[in-house]
Every structure is written in structure tokens, then in C-alpha cells.
Image (cartoon, grey):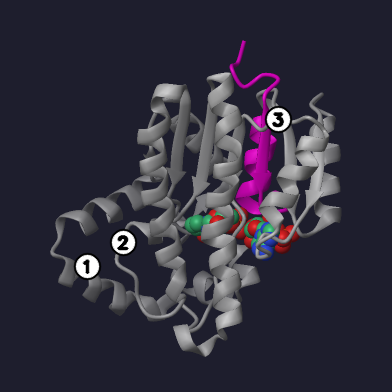
């Protein structure tokens, strides 16, 4: 029997893209799924699809840019006597522009969603996983968390680098408790991400198809990596190569290349 059978998975950003794909693949492995995001109709449609696979679902609409959201999600689950065995932090978006082009309110909300909400949900979920001696924390970072950043989208790379380091620490702390923590660092992936931040046209112009990843492959590869006890997963040979090169070349050269490339697909 699949060890995921009958477990409860909490998936953020489940109304689209990678989050929806993680929810589908976890349900296919027999997990009951709690789906959260802001768009309730999307969550309802996904929940109906997952119930057809014979699993239970819970829908919790929430805006994770609100500091109260993680606590409210956990309170709703406590009322139903559900304690998640698997947490997938996938909610996110790309905030275009240079740092001071955006108000601090926007930048602060971005950090709340991309950093604090992920850390808070893990903090809420880990004690239950520990008690039961089994768990998974999957954080969706980006290849941007592993390579030098360029101008624009200033907090994006920083927030994704946080998730890498955070997951590595958590993995070291929780391995003895039967909990696997894995951070996935995808490159460009076909989802709604680039439609939401208005970079689709630039991306289509600049990015050859072979550089694009598919959400179902990313989710499947990540779950496999987590099962194998891998802490950092970089999907796709293209991005494995980029990360490996960025790690062996001098930092000044990696920064120079990142700056030269940014105009091709970045909207600053
Ligand atoms: N696609 C890529 O090329 C790529 C590459 C590397 C990493 N990533 C990362 O992958 C993760 C998932 O992105 P995706 O590619 O799947 O994009 P997507 O298709 O646009 O999905 C983003 C999800 O995040 C949710 N979300 C956004 N803001 C939210 C908020 N304030 N509160 C709650 N939920 C919110 C959205 O739901 P609602 O709008 O309904 O709230 C949606 O479900 C992100 O963390 C992203 O940084 C993406």
C-alpha cells in the first residue's frame, strides 16, 4: 500500500498551476486533500475532480498575504479534527519592477505570502507530524533561489533563497522524526504564473520550448525526490546544468551573466 494512502495533505496555491498539480497527484496516491487559495470557485472545481478519485477534500479560501491566514486555516482544520501529514507550500506570484517602484505595503504583503506564510504553516503542521512519526513538508522555491539574481523582482529570488535554506534546516531537524522536507527549485514552467505577472509575451519571445517545464513532471519529480529523502530538487537537465555551472563559476561572473540575461524575459 502507498504510504500516502489515507493521509491528509494541505496544499496552498491549489487553484492553479503547480499547487493544483500537487493536489491531483497526492489524491491519485490516496491522500485526502485540503486545498487553499483565494479563488473559491477554482478550489470547488478541483475538489469535485478529486472527490471523483474517492478521496475526501476540504476547501479553505484564504489570502495568505494576510498575517492572520495561516492561523485561521489551522483553526478551521482543528474544528474538523484534521492535522495535516503533508504540507505543500506552493502559493506565490512574481512581483515585477524594481524594489522602490512598489510601495512597502506591496513588498510587505509579498514577503508575508512568499516567506512568512510558508514558515508559519510549517510551524503549525510539524508538531502533529512529529507526534505521528511521519510527515512531508514540500516548499516550492525556484531556480531563482539558487542562482545570482538580477535587477527587478527584487524580493523574489531572496524569498526563494530563504525557502531553500529554511527547508535544509528543517530537514536536518526533522529527519529523526520520520519527516521528509524537500524544496523544489523549478525553472520556467507552464502555469498561470507568467500570465499573472504580465511577462508571458516576453517569455514566449525569449524562451525556447525546451527550456520550459511541465507542472505535472515537476510535481511528480518532487514527490519522488521527497520519497527518496532528497532535500533540494532541481527538475530538468537544463536547470540542473545552469545551477551546477552557477555553483562552480566565480560569483562575479555568474552575476554578470544574470544581469546580461535579465532583459530577455524580465519586466522591470
Ligand atoms: N511557473 C513558473 O515558471 C515557476 C517557476 C519557479 C517557481 N515557481 C513557483 O511555483 C509556485 C506556484 O506558482 P505557479 O507557477 O503554479 O503559478 P500559478 O499558476 O499562477 O499559481 C499560483 C497559485 O498561488 C495562489 N496565490 C497567489 N497569491 C496568493 C495569495 N495572496 N493568497 C493565497 N494564494 C495565492 C494562486 O491562487 P489564487 O489566485 O486563487 O489566490 C494560485 O493558486 C510559486 O511559489 C512560484 O513562485 C513557478
Task: Classify residue 110 by image quadrant.
Answer: bottom right
**Residue at x 62% of width, y 22% of height:** 4
Badge 2 element: loop
Q: Categorize mark 1 by other alpha carbons within 10 Å: few (<14), some (14-19), many (20+).
A: some
Q: Position of residue 101 (x, y in %)?
A: 51, 89
Q: Nearer the viewer, residue 31 or 169?
A: 169
* 94 w.r.t. 186: above or below: below
Position of residue 234 relative to residue 62, above or below, is above
Which badge, 1 or 3, is on the more N-terminal residue? 3
Pointer 1 residue:
254
Q: Disc 1, disc 2: CB below 8 Å?
A: yes
Marks 1 and 2 sit apart, C-alpha to C-alpha, by 8 Å
The picture places residue 64, in percent across and down from the top left corner, at 67, 59
Give the magenta part as a residue range.
Answer: 1-27
Q: Is residue 172 visible?
A: yes
The reply, left or right, for residue 95 in relation to residue 84 is left
Q: What distance separates the C-alpha of mark 3 from that of mark 2?
A: 33 Å
- Measured as percent of width and height from the top left, residue 130 is found at 53, 26
Q: Find disc 2 in the rendering and name its residue.
A: 147
Instruction: Determine which quarter of the picture holds residue 263.
Output: bottom left
Determine which residue is flagged by label 3.
27
In reply to whether residue 208 is colored magenta, the answer given is: no
Give how far across and how far down residue 76 sits, in percent. 80, 43
Is 211 drawn above or below residue 21 in the view shown?
below
Q: Depth check: 76 or 148 in front?
A: 76
Residue appearing at x 47%, y 75% in the figure: 153
Amino acid at each position: 500500500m502507498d504510504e500516502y494512502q489515507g493521509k491528509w495533505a494541505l496544499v496552498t496555491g491549489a487553484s492553479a498551476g503547480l499547487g493544483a498539480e500537487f493536489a491531483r497527484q497526492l489524491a491519485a496516491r490516496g491522500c485526502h486533500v485540503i486545498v487553499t487559495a483565494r479563488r473559491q470557485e477554482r478550489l470547488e472545481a478541483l475538489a469535485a475532480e478529486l472527490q471523483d478519485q474517492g478521496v475526501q477534500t476540504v476547501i479553505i479560501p484564504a489570502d495568505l498575504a494576510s498575517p492572520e491566514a495561516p492561523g485561521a486555516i489551522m483553526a478551521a482544520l482543528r474544528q474538523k479534527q484534521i492535522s495535516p501529514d503533508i504540507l505543500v507550500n506552493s502559493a506565490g506570484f512574481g512581483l515585477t519592477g524594481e524594489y522602490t517602484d512598489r510601495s512597502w505595503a506591496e513588498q510587505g504583503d509579498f514577503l508575508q505570502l512568499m516567506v512568512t506564510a510558508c514558515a508559519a504553516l510549517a510551524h503549525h503542521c510539524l508538531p502533529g507530524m512529529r507526534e505521528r512519526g511521519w510527515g512531508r513538508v514540500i516548499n516550492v522555491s525556484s531556480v531563482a533561489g539558487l542562482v545570482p539574481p538580477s535587477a527587478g523582482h527584487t524580493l523574489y529570488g531572496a524569498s526563494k533563497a530563504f525557502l531553500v535554506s529554511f527547508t535544509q534546516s528543517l530537514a536536518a531537524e526533522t529527519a529523526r522524526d520520520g519527516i521528509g522536507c524537500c524544496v523544489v527549485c523549478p525553472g520556467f514552467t507552464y502555469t498561470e504564473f507568467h500570465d499573472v505577472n504580465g511577462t508571458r509575451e516576453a517569455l514566449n519571445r525569449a524562451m525556447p520550448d525546451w527550456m520550459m517545464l511541465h507542472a505535472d513532471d515537476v510535481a511528480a519529480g518532487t514527490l519522488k525526490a521527497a520519497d527518496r529523502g532528497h532535500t533540494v530538487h532541481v527538475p530538468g537537465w537544463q536547470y540542473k546544468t545552469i545551477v551546477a555551472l552557477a555553483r562552480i563559476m566565480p560569483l562575479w561572473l555568474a552575476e554578470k551573466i544574470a544581469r546580461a540575461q535579465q532583459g530577455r524575459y524580465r519586466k522591470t
